[in-house]
Amino acid sequence: MTGPAGWELAYGTEAFHREAGTHLRAEAARCTVLLTTAETLRLHGPGAYGGAAPVFGWWRAAAGGPVEGAFVHAPPFPPALGPMPRRAARELAAALRPTGTDLPGVQGTESSAVPFALAWAGGGWTATRRLRLLALAEPAAPHPAPPGSDRPATPADVPLVAAWLRGFTTDTGLPRSTDADLTAQARRRIADGALHLWEDGGRPVAMAARSATVAGQARIGPVYTPPRDRGRGYGGAVTSAAARAAQSAGARRVLLFADAANPTSNDLYARLGYRLLDHHTDIDFT
């Protein structure tokens, strides 16, 4: 498809995939958040994340030219930016400002998130988390393997999963969701068959979710082990189980994000066979 220069905004996934699909597939790994968020909204509707109506956008340097940048904003989460020229990131801030949108921050590749933050907030922003985008290159099972086994979460696990999602958002500093939103997210992930639990002695001790397979790839996360069960290998075991399930579901590439400031998790993922693809940044506006 062709279109005008600059940013175009839309409020549905159909136009987003029609206009930006070629770009998204060409940059599938670095657009993983955009792809999985759009797929969740397509499958579960615009209220899937519990916030206001989502907004999608794509950018062309010249009229009739190819799309070179894209974003998805699914409140209450901040906009997720894919790879784009720095000029496009700056112009996105100008395109969103007239909409009256109150943004808590932005997330995306460092080369797009930082120029957007400078254009949107000047000096009033903080990089709260730097992430490493990893891809599974040489799958390896945890060694030594912890006791127990994995199983898919069931509707009976919704209260536990919602509580663990709360723990994950607290640990990572992600935007705080209501209990109702976390419960809805737990139900949705479980209904999709996309949430895995590791059990030891019949007791759940860790969880890992996986995204839908989109553009031949799936992403693992969140991964969470409650504090009392950490350091025993459960997180690595359930991560491997979720990755195997993603591959069985057709994913040719498995991705995950790791906190760059957490050497323990980065060492674990390296042992499991994950390798660095790119750097992403979470930014809060102050």
Image: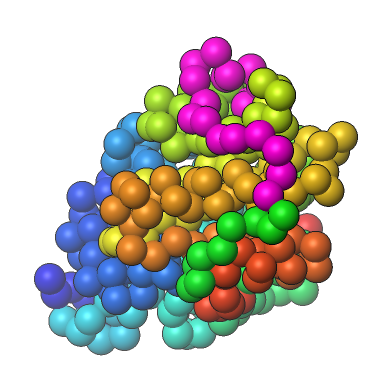
Q: Is residue 281 left or right of residue 4?
A: right
Residue depicted at 36% across the width and 69% down the height: 28
Q: Which is nearer the eye, 39 or 239?
A: 239
Q: Is residue 148 left or right of residue 80?
A: right
The single residue placed furthest to the top in the displayed view is: 156
The single residue placed furthest to the right in the displayed view is: 228
Q: Is residue 151 magenta?
A: yes
Q: Which is nearer the eye, 280 or 12?
A: 280
- Whether residue 255 is situated above or below residue 138 in the rendered picture: above
Q: Is residue 160 magenta?
A: yes
- Whether residue 197 is situated above or below residue 202 in the rendered picture: below
Residue depicted at 20% across the width and 84% down the height: 65
Q: x, y percentage for residue 17?
A: 23, 58
Where is residue 285, by image quadrant?
bottom right
Q: Is residue 186 left or right of residue 64?
A: right
Where is residue 124, by image quadrant?
bottom right
- Whether residue 76 is situated above or below residue 264 in the rendered picture: above
Look at the image and tell me whether residue 8 can be seen.
no
Residue depicted at 52% across the width and 31% down the height: 151
Residue depicted at 29% across the width and 41% down the height: 42
Q: x, y percentage for residue 85?
A: 45, 85
Q: x, y percentage for residue 211?
A: 43, 47
The span picked out in magenta is: 145-163
Q: Is residue 173 left or right of residue 73?
A: right
Q: Which is nearer the eye, 115 or 269?
A: 269
Q: Where's the C terminus, which quadrant?
A: bottom right
Q: Where's the N terminus, which quadrant?
A: bottom left
Q: Which is nearer the eye, 7 or 129?
A: 129
Look at the image and tell me whether residue 217 can be seen.
yes
Count of all numbered marks drawn on residues in the image: 0
